Image (tube, helix red, strand yellow):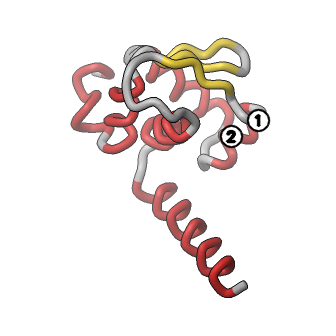
Amino acid sequence: MIATASNHLHDLVQQIEQLKAQSGVQRVADFLASLVSVESGCCDVPLPYEKTLIAGQLGLKPESFSRTFAKLRSVGVAVHASRVGVSDISKLRRIAADERATIRGVFR
């Protein structure tokens, strides 16, 4: 029971660190990357629940969540209802790790 509580606390601390340290683009990229098991290539990601719930979990307002997807469109992310197409999952993982170094030129 103590181990379970410790793991839960660790997960919550990681989530808080993510909310504080990462941009909205990084959080969405990281969330999408966490839903797939492939390391490279293209993939189709089914969203596990409604977009408003995902936005809340990531600390974003629904409109900010939509704007984030609009930004990610330039790197090959396309939203189709409750599915997201990713043209290059390795690029998405790099964005999640370091947005500024990876996509600075893309968004400007």
Left or right placement of residue 98 versus residue 61 in this view: left
Q: Amino acid at mark 1?
A: Tyr
Q: Which tag is nearer the camera, tag 1 or tag 2?
A: 1
Residue 90: x %, y % from top left: 35, 29
Residue 108 in the image: above or below residue 52? above
Between discs 1 and 2, the one toward the N terminus: 1
Tell which of 43 and 98 is nearer to you. 43
Amino acid on which the number 2 mark rests in the picture: Ile
Q: Name the secondary structure under disc 2.
A: helix
Quarter occupied by the N terminus:
bottom right
Q: Secondary structure at mark 1?
A: loop
Quote the CA–CA distance across marks 1 and 2.
7 Å
Determine which residue is flagged by label 2. Answer: 54
Q: Which residue appears at 76% of the width and 35% of the height? A: 49
For label 2, the crowd category at 10 Å Cα-Cα, with few meaning under 14, some 14 to 19 and many 20 or more, is: some
Q: Quadrant of residue 76?
A: top left
- Which percent across, then down, holds residue 70? 51, 19
Q: Which mark is residue 4?
A: none
Disc sitting over residue 49 in the figure: 1
Residue 78's spot in the image, x, y percent?
Answer: 54, 14
Which residue sits at x=60%, y=24%? Answer: 45
- How many numbered marks appear? 2
- Comparing 64 with 7, the one in front is 7
Q: Would you place residue 1 above or below residue 103 in this image?
A: below
